Image (tube, rainbow, N blue to C red):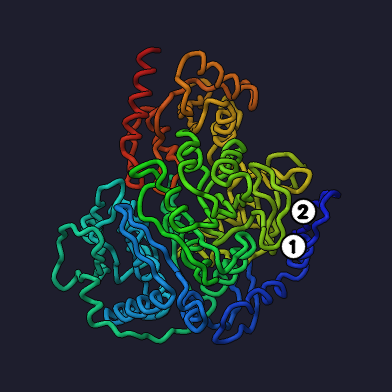
Amino acid sequence: MTGSAPQEPKYWPLKRYFEVYDRSLRDPEGFWAEEARKLDWFRTWDKVLDWSPPFARWFVGGELNACHLCVDRHIKTWRKSKVAIYWEGEPGDTRVLSYSTLYREVNRCASVLKNLGVGKGDTVALYLPMIPELPIFMLACGRIGATHTVVFSGFSPRALADRINDIGAKLLVTADGGFRRGTPMPLKNMADEALELTPGVEKTVVVNRAGIAVNMRRGRDFWYHHLLEDAEASVSVEPVESTHPLYILYTSGTTGKPKGIVHSTGGYLVFNYSTYQWVFDIKEESVYWCTADVGWVTGHSSIVYAPLAHGAAIVMYEGAPDYPTLDRWWDIIEKYGVTTFYTSPTAIRMFMAHGEEWPARRDLSSLELLGTVGEPINPEAWLWYYRHIGGERCPIVDTWWQTETGGTMISHAPGIELLPLKPGSAGFPLPGIDAAVVDESGQPAKAGEKGLLIIRKPWPGMLLTIHGNPERYQEAYWKRFPGAYYTGDYAVKDEEGYFWLLGRADEVIKVAGHRLGTLELENAAISHPAVAESAAVSKPDPVKGDTIVMFVILKEGFEASPALTKEIVGQIRKMVGPIATPERIFFVGKLPKTRSGKIMRRVLKAVASEVPIGDVSTLEDGASVDEVRAAYEALEEEV
């Protein structure tokens, strides 16, 4: 397959984006080699790309080090005194780490790891809250050539154990606890349960964060602050091959065993260094805040590796977005003078439901650029974000990417050229990304026609493989459209070349033989002026196969009523069609979400189908499930 630049509207006088994009597809290896030279290498590569479909190895023969790129090279410049991390704990405690401080802490941490017997080629599991020690341990692993896997601190002991066993980690790093909504999460206690199932773990390091009592097994468990007493002040950087695994991160699917996505060092860092510059238009004086948890790929790339490689100042926040008050995030933006704010559409819709008076209480004038990630953003949320957070002066970059892609693939790119914005559109593929929308048979979809998103050329940030299962890698991503990476997402490309993401192709409700995407239904409901958030799920039906059930959060000032239900149903029918008529609409005050802000539709479907809910260890607020269940039971009784 061959790629071409997005169709260029005649009225655009701006050419730079298209020039860069065309060049990147005409000579991808030359383009990426030029980008790679912006980083420090201990040894230059022999070959830019070794492509044995579907396996790609980038900058073969080159040697570098992630920690050197993110820390060491900055302390040799004026950035040594620049802030690297502004950290805010949920209780209000703070820490500020300059690049010099970060360098010192990472070296001492690397010494701790080496003293515990960890070296190049070993794997380390990190099960920590959002505290500075999390990126410190990630960078320290990279410094000595160890591969890390970060396990989201909301995962259950069983999920933690499965990941530890899959990668064969010999060391687990955790904390006594971390704060969430004012209550310490007992991480060490959960880790202890996991350790009963992980015979390969030899030692555990425990960070004292919450000051809660924990069990410490002699010979296995060690307090981090005690280990630091014997740490060396300096540890040499270990040059690693470009293809050396930097980290393994597990995707959290609803079915099947989670996939251990393996990312290289060289290709991943080159890709993220470039895309972060293009998307966020890096400036020395800027302060960046990505609200994701480091336990997800967004946190890896957009909190740790990309911004620190650029020598940026970042914000990390430990707690919930609305605790103890609904203006906590806006207070943090005001406090640290955040210039670039990057969050999820789900979080935006949550704040929409509470009204614009909360952000209006804070001075958000420092903001210059807004971003979204994690799922497509509906136009109503885009406009609210633009008006009430960005003050109608900040461009919005709606980024599309995946754990597997390593970094942003489709987005507006202010760092190259800011093309006209369309609320709800992700924009265009970034340079080097040959994206296309195709039908079920792999033929290009017509402009405005929904199809499946594929990537037709390899890119440096792509995953190396699925850990221990290369066959599954080929089956999951390359079998459906031979020669192209299958993203699993629906998309539309309009007549001007803009991409519109429509959510996962597997998040489909089949009603009487018709396939309806959950996102399409939810956006139709949100387009009603009374609706702040919505979630669509299916309920088994003996005749239709599935029926549609929707859970809706109303904006401030609106109340649930049969008349409003009728209006919302009418809006959905108008925008999607009569086949999309919901069987029930339930009005709730909150939806079950993960701590990264994603709606747990699986939980809603279980409630509607009256089956067991299953594991909810990643749930942000357990009360949301009780509320959803109560709303469902109350309406069912009325019916």
Within 10 Å of disc 1 (Cα), the crowding (few <14, some 14-19, many 20+) is: many
Q: Quadrant of residue 83?
A: bottom left
Q: Which mark is residue 9?
A: none
Q: Picture coordinates of residue 387 (x, y %)?
A: 59, 41
Quadrant of the drawing holding the N terminus: bottom right
Name the residue at 59% across, 58% down: 408
Amino acid type of disc 1?
Tyr
Tags 1 and 2 touching, CB below 8 Å: yes
* Placement of 571 over or under 159, stated as above or below: above
Q: x and y percent of residue 112 in the render?
A: 29, 78
- Whether residue 441 is visible to the viewer of this picture, yes or no, is no
Q: Residue at horizontal 75%, vertical 60%?
A: 17
Question: Tag 2 or tag 1, which sits nearer the N-term?
Answer: 2
In front: 219, or 55? Answer: 219
Please tell me which residue is depicted at 50% across the width and 38% down the height of the picture. Answer: 349
The C terminus lies in which quarter of the figure? top left
What secondary structure is found at the residue carrying circle 1? helix
**Residue farthest to the right, as pictured:** 10
User: Residue 430 at what x, y percent from top left?
Assistant: 67, 59
Between 392 and 34, the residue placed more toward the observer is 392
Please state which of residues 558 and 193 is positioned toward the viewer in this rendering. Answer: 558
**Can you tell which quarter of the image residue 40 is in?**
bottom right
For disc 2, the neighbor class at 10 Å (few under 14, some 14 to 19, many from 20) is many
User: How far is mark 1 from mark 2, CA to CA?
Assistant: 9 Å
Residue 21: which numbered mark, if any?
Answer: 1
Frontmost residue, 110 versus 242: 110
Instruction: Residue 531 in the image: state x and y as whole percent.
Output: 52, 28
Q: Which residue is mark 2?
A: 6
